[in-house]
């Protein structure tokens, strides 16, 4: 337990002081259970309010080795920006990327829900919006060292840009929306959510089960950043990111530099 807390404290302190961690601060977790123990300890140490959760994919063959094809990490309320053209800070000496994502909101009172189908999952959702997840960590190897390391530092999340509402989402095939990501006006990725396992609703089902197993209460409702649709695109301070969701609209942000908090 001592090493778990020491790793958690190192990540929280590095994030607060906006400094990089050139090496993983301890013995890296070998499995997802160990990763979430570190994440849970860091949540307790950090103490900020959580407004949502990011869900990321775990690719083969690691999904079979780890026993899951997704991971989760908290999105703190003070890193959520509800306006277009926002400036989103990243750790310049760590890892930084932007991801076009669909944001689904689990309505209050559905923490114990266990939907098994898309229709059942829709019943626990009250809103869908366009968004950009900012993936950033003080540790540069957060993704290359594997999913357990990614999950251990808040799932490599450092913010969320919440864009416009997807009107009529109940009747839209979320997996058919063409999504493009542009950095400084240049397209860096294009895809649909059809490539994302069982899609955004599957991400919600995963998260509900994951948080219930960890004893985390979301009875007040929570956002789900459902996964990178066009990929994980590296960014640096000063760049501008745009995520275009077909005819449904777009979301913009500028990348800034994390500051001491």
Image (spheres, rainbow, N blue to C red):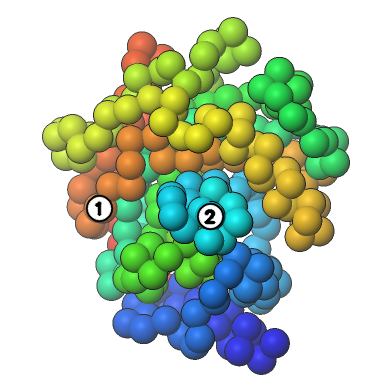
Q: Secondary structure at mark 2?
A: helix
- Image quadrant where one finds the N terminus: bottom right
In the image, taking residue 10 as reference, residue 91 lies left or right, namely left
User: From where the camera sits, is residue 99 visible?
Assistant: yes
Q: Which residue occupies 46% across, 85% down?
A: 25
Please tell me which residue lies in front, 82 or 196: 196
Task: Assess disc 1: are there few (<14), some (14-19) or many (≥20) residues with their C-alpha within 10 Å of its C-alpha.
Answer: many
Of pointers 1 and 2, the one earlier in the residue sequence: 2
Please identify, in this view, whether the residue under mark 1 or under mark 2 is nearer the observer: 2
Please tell me which residue lies in front, 57 or 255: 57
Q: For mark 2, what is the residue?
A: 64
Q: Which residue occupies 66% across, 22% down?
A: 118
Question: Marks 1 and 2, how far apart in space?
Answer: 30 Å
Q: For mark 1, what is the residue?
A: 235
Q: Secondary structure at mark 1?
A: loop
User: From where the camera sits, is residue 259 visible?
Assistant: no
């Amino acid at each position: 337990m001592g090493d778990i807390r020491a790793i958690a404290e190192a990540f929280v302190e590095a994030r607060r002081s906006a400094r990089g961690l050139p090496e993983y601060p301890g013995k890296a977790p070998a499995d997802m259970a160990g990763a979430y123990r570190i994440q849970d300890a860091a949540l307790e140490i950090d103490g900020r309010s959580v407004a949502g959760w990011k869900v990321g994919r775990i690719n083969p063959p690691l999904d079979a080795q780890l026993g899951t094809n997704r991971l989760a990490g908290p999105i703190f309320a003070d890193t959520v920006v509800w306006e277009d053209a926002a400036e989103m800070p990243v750790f310049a000496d760590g890892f930084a990327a932007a991801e076009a994502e669909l944001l689904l909101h689990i309505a209050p009172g559905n923490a114990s829900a266990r939907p098994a189908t898309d229709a059942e999952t829709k019943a626990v959702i009250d809103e869908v919006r366009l968004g950009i997840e900012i993936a950033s960590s003080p540790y540069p190897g957060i993704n290359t060292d594997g999913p357990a390391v990614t999950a251990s530092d808040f799932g490599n999340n450092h913010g969320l840009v919440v864009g416009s509402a997807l009107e009529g989402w109940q009747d839209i095939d979320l997996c058919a929306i063409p999504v493009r990501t542009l950095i400084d006006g240049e397209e860096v990725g294009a895809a649909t959510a059809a490539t994302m396992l069982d899609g955004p609703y599957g991400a919600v089902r995963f998260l509900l089960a994951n948080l219930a197993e960890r004893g985390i209460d979301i009875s007040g409702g929570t956002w789900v950043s459902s996964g990178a649709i066009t990929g994980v695109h590296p960014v640096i301070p000063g760049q501008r990111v745009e995520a275009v969701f077909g005819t449904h609209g777009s979301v913009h942000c500028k990348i800034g530099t994390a500051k001491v908090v």
